[in-house]
Amino acid sequence: MKIIYLVIILLFTSCNDSNLHVNLNEDKTEAGTQLYQISTIQALLAGLYDGDLTVGDLQEHGDFGIGTFNGIDGEMIVYDGTVYQVKSDGHVYVADKTTGVPFACVHFFQSDINTTLNNITSYEALKTSLNGYKECKNYPCAFKIDGTFNYIKTRSEPKASKPYPPLAEYITDNQVYFEAQNISGTLIGYVLPQYFEKVNVVGYHLHFLSDDKTFGGHVLELSLNSANIQLDKLYEFKLSLLKTTEFENSSLEHDKDAVDKVEK
């Protein structure tokens, strides 16, 4: 009987352990499981830079996320409910609620995993480390990574003028780079599975915001000694398409390597 009892206990414990990665946050609300997106990456790549929804509209769907503004006027960072705009002058502004949004992803951040990360020498090394979280293999995941960065390189871009060129062309010709050393701040963004390729950037897409809210942008390179990682696994996806004449009439065509040009 003692042997049978021990086997039952071990089986029960094993089942509980296997469920730890399935439901890591039992207090998570329904609002914290949905990724909300305005428009598609194909529309943005094709030069559809004006949205019919605003920053204020976006804030109703999340307190955490990334995106851009009408005319590709800088990089968007949504952090703790505030929408920040990193412009091409290198400064960080609180975005006006009436500003249009042609593309963005947000959700209400509720951490599933909280752990630490050490000795990251490059952005590629960070991606390799984050690939260890199998929770994100087939689900969208949000990452909030806080720490002091030895080095970080970001970019932004000035507002485009009409007629808008394709995004890859515009970013290549107009992006402005920023660098900082020994700076404390937060990486904010998402990793998306391959099946998202028709609507968003597949893989990692991270923006940075310094603790003092004076430095930020789209992340291009980094290194850090240690950081705290919070991971939020998402189970639902809602897409709001642009309700504009430009979207209705566009072919949405773009170069097949356009995403790589924009992200790098």
Image (cartoon, rainbow, N blue to C red):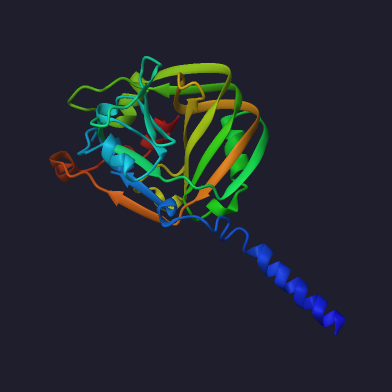
Q: Quadrant of the N terminus?
A: bottom right
Quadrant hosting residue 123: top right
> 209 above or below 127?
above
Is residue 26 visible from the viewing direction of this image?
A: yes
In the orientation shown, which residue stands out farthest toward the top? 89
Which residue: 31% across, 38% down?
A: 103
Task: Name the outermost residue toward the front.
Answer: 27
Q: Which of 128/107 is in front?
A: 107
At horizontal 56% and vertical 60% (from top left) the residue drawn is: 23
User: What residue is drawn where x is 45% and y is 29%?
Assistant: 264
In depth, the one of 209 and 260 nearer the eye is 209
Q: Position of residue 9 (x, y in %)?
A: 76, 73
Q: Which of 244 and 6 lies nearest the eye of the viewer?
A: 6
Query: Which residue is outermost to the right?
Result: 2
> Residue 189 placed where, x, y %?
46, 38
Q: Residue at x 45, y 57 (%)?
A: 235
Which image quadrant is residue 81 in?
top left
